[in-house]
Image: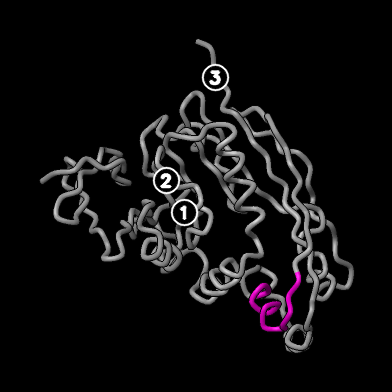
Amino acid sequence: MNNTSHYLCPICQHALTLQDKVYRCDNNHAFDQAKEGYVNLLPVQFKHSKDPGDNKQMVNARRAFLESGCYQPLRDTLVKLYQQYINGGNVIDAGCGEGYYTMAHSMDNNQVYGVDIAKNAVKIAAKKYKQCHFSVASIAQLPFADGFAKWLYSIYAPIKTEEFSRLLADDGYLVTVTPGEKHLWELKQMIYQTPKYHNIGKQQLDGFELVAEENLNYEMLFAHGEQALTLLAMTPFAFKSSEQLLSDLQQANNFICQADFMIRVYKKSIVSS
């Protein structure tokens, strides 16, 4: 039995059909569905490294941190915005990681797709969240047809305006999440002699109109040092950590650190003919 999928072949951009756990296009390019349910649509010739994306240590650290609930206010805010503006149609999480935000958008009246270049993360997401669709692919070439999505969001991932505009329907929305000025400020103070605030200047995105902006700021309390170490391990700061920093965090019971996010909602601009 053939089942038309919503994926495009990354090699020739023809539609893929799922049959016997193999996605295949009419040019006979084939991609196996993994036992966890995801499909790898990142051919080896498109990779810039052997194992692109976050490594397994960072993926596992982020998974543990997110499951602690520290970023749940961000997840709840994103879902609230989705329900406010669209509440239906196809949703894409561009840079989905382990699927923490992806699964929260899954409802009875939509289909939710998570895409990430890190196979380690997608494997975890697909195994845990069966109600969503996951694939390994580059967000610079998302494996969907033009106008496929009503709602697309990107959390701390590169913004590919031309590709996102192609992918969104004329009445579609793009949501971006970037660090607020004092995101993880207390952690930065432990790492840098002269820490600097994040730049939160508005970014003009070609092909999009900014329709809403929200700053979400709150304190996170880590009762035990291990929780603070998990936070460090899931950030790029991990590469700058010293033995002294690791020791200090290990002993930092009741460590308070700020979460600070800039959330922006953009509507796709319709170009008149």
Main SS, magenta region, reads: helix
**Quadrant in the picture for residue 201:** top right
Res 103 label: 1
* Crowding near the residue tagged with mark 3, few <14, some 14–19, many ≥20 C-alpha atoms within 10 Å: few
Residue drawn at point x = 45 percent, y = 63 percent: 118
**Picture layout, residue 255 above or below residue 131:** below
Name the spot of residue 163 as percent of width and height, x first: 49, 37
The reply to whether discs 1 and 2 touch (Cβ–Cβ < 8 Å) is yes
Which dot, 2 or 3, sits closer to the camera? 2
The residue type indicated by label 2 comes to Val
The residue type indicated by label 1 comes to Met
Q: Mark 2 points at which residue?
A: 112
The reply to whether discs 2 and 3 touch (Cβ–Cβ < 8 Å) is no
Q: Please say whether residue 222 is one of the residues in the magenta stretch.
A: yes
Sequence-first disc among 1 and 2? 1
Q: Distance between the residues labelled 1 and 2?
A: 8 Å
Dot 3 lies on which element? loop
Name the spot of residue 189 as percent of width and height, x first: 85, 71
**Picture layout, residue 187 above or below residue 273:** below
Q: How many marks?
A: 3
Q: Please say whether residue 193 is one of the residues in the magenta stretch.
A: no
Q: Name the residue under label 3.
A: 270
Name the spot of residue 268 as percent of width and height, x first: 56, 27
Q: What stretch is highlighted in magenta?
A: 221-232
Res 67 label: none
Tell whether 192 sits left or right of 123. right
**Quadrant in the picture for residue 251:** bottom right
Q: Distance between the residues labelled 2 and 3?
A: 24 Å
Sequence-first disc among 1 and 3? 1
